[in-house]
Amino acid sequence: MALLTWLKRHLVVLAGLLTLGYLLLPNVIVTVFSFNQPKGRFNYEWQHFSADAWKDPCGVADLCGSLALSLQIAFWATLGATVLGTMIAFALVRYRFRARGAISSLLFLPMAMPEVVMAASLLTLFLNMGARLGFWTVLIAHIMFCLSFVVTAVKARVMSMDPRLEQAAQDLYAGPFQTFLRVTLPIAAPGIAAGALLAFALSFDDFIITNFNAGSAVTFPMFVWGSAQRGTPVQINVIGTAMFVVAVLLVLASMALGRRRTRRKA
Amino acid sequence: MTTTLTEAPPPLSPTAPERTPPRRRGRLTPYWLLLPGILWLVLFFLLPMVYQASTSVQTGSLEQGYEVTWHFATYWDALSAYAPQFLRSVVYAAAATVLCLLLGYPLAYLIAFRAGRWRNLIMVLVIAPFFTSFLIRTLAWKTILADGGPLVGALNTLHVLDVTGWLGWTAGDRVLATPLAVVCGLTYNFLPFMVLPLYTSLERIDPRLHEASGDLYARPSTTFRKVTFPLSMPGVVSGTLLTFIPATGDYVNADLLGSTDTRMVGNVIQTQFLRVLDYPTAAALSFILMAAILLMVTVYIRRSGTEDLV
């Protein structure tokens, strides 16, 4: 009876933890299988423990090349989308102008469109233009679909900003440029950083749009996709695990840093 | 003293004659700020849609080139040839969305109200998988659902597979290469997109409302039905949209975890475009998918918007 009431009270917690397990189970599998020594070309069945892949993560042809290409594209796409998106976000929050509704819908549409539709239509454009598919077409596509997400992130932050802070700066004889650089930008920075982080993650992990518009260039997700057909090297799991661990450590470190800063302020 | 950056709220200090010149400059500023980004979207989002619409009514061949002939029959042919794939996309995506809501709600609730000092850690664990490529994580499901693996073995012993097999979700004693595997993959891949908006809207609820409801002798289940769930509707709406839309267009899960009998419309578009090179059919299919999604989203937002007010 006591067990039943306990269960009833903690049902939500149990169900939530089960879902969390469902979300994390594949990551556990990816990590465990990064220490596998598979028989044959595919790494789906557990055989023996081996750390060979960890000692030689670039041991598979083209793997690290594709990783480098993905990082490069993600870097430039993040930069482009963050600059353009921040400008749009400031315009939307700070100014009244015509065609505001149309611009908001234009920004919403790429987020409400299945990726395969954007991918296919962009490819028709490039084919009609006779553009050579590769690094540049992928970069163009990535900036396009990251833009709206950056705008959303930055807008939320700028909207909650107190405009009187900038007026105070101007009352203290700061020029518009100085005000922007020393007051506006630092306050908006967390929103811009969140937008940039989102853009980086979206661009780095994008497969569908990239697959349509990359031509013969091979990004990391495309390498993984290809290997699912030809045979999956253990090194893929090594890189997946490493990225997960680095991401968790970075987030935990920034959280600890933030906590220490607030404590010092208090 | 210029007020270029503060047009929206009424400026406090400067006098009228001083303000005139900067204001004229400020009138153009928003357009300059918008220009590059909006131009990018017009060139690489809107213009492609126009090209796609035009491609869908062209006829011709790859060798001789295509010409616009207003051949609308392509739409009818594509729709009748690929109706099962369209239907499958909608059914799988709807199933995955419902599953995401059922699985994601308790997790979002847990993070918002019950996690205490574990809240940040759980949030990190929800987001962190994003940093491992989703293709690698989807491939891991091949291991989890492997034929003769522990999970499938357990489901077999419990006779669950008999029931799902009878329903047509699985075939024989396999889970891989069946609709169930595809829906499971879709649910897994888009679950965070459900949890995050749900959490955001749950977190805004004042916990005192729960106490008030309890003080008025509402049982916990009544409190949930009459207070918590209605207040979380914005999160439910955006969460379902964020899972349903990408799930309908997805072809990765159907390809990696499914079989030829689980092909979705995304698979068809991909094959027609990249392998068969039948551009008009692919463009028509993609156009139909876009129109269908936009229609569903608009109706859904309207409906849920009015329900939200009640």
Image (spheres, helix red, strand yellow):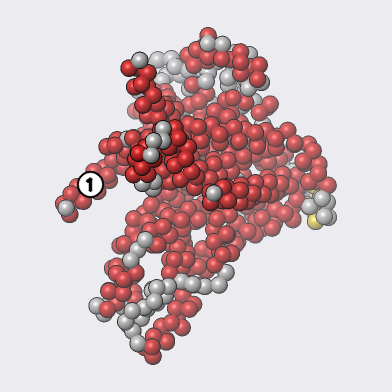
Viewer-side residue, A109 vs B220 = B220
In the figure, residue B162 lies in which quadrant?
Answer: top right
Q: What residue type is labelled 1?
A: Arg
Quarter of the view holding residue B42: bottom right
Q: Which residue lies furthest to the top in this view?
A: B157
Name above or below for residue B221 compared with residue A81.
above
Query: How far across and how far down the image is residue A243, in percent?
Result: 38, 37
Which part of the image, by quadrant, shows the N terminus of chain A? top left
Q: Give percent across and percent down for residue B23.
A: 43, 82
Q: Residue at x 59, y 58 (%)?
A: B44
**Is residue A203 in view from this perspective?**
yes
Residue B200, position in %: x, y? 41, 46
The answer to whether residue A21 of the structure is visible from this angle is no
Relative to the observer, which residue lies in front, A6 or A225?
A6
State the image quarter where residue B261 is shown: top right
**Which residue is pictured at 77% across the width and 41% down the height?**
B78
Q: Residue furthest bottom?
A: B17
Image vertical order of residue B214 relative to residue A48, above or below: below
In the displayed structure, does residue B146 sit left or right of residue B205?
A: right
The residue sitting at 43% across, 69% down in the picture is A94
Camera-side residue of A223 and B298: B298
Q: Is mark 1 on a helix, strand or loop?
A: helix
Within 10 Å of disc 1 (Cα), the crowding (few <14, some 14-19, many 20+) is few
Residue appearing at x 58%, y 29% in the figure: B183
- The residue to which callout 1 is attached is A259
Q: Pick whichever, B12 or B164, lies toward us.
A: B12
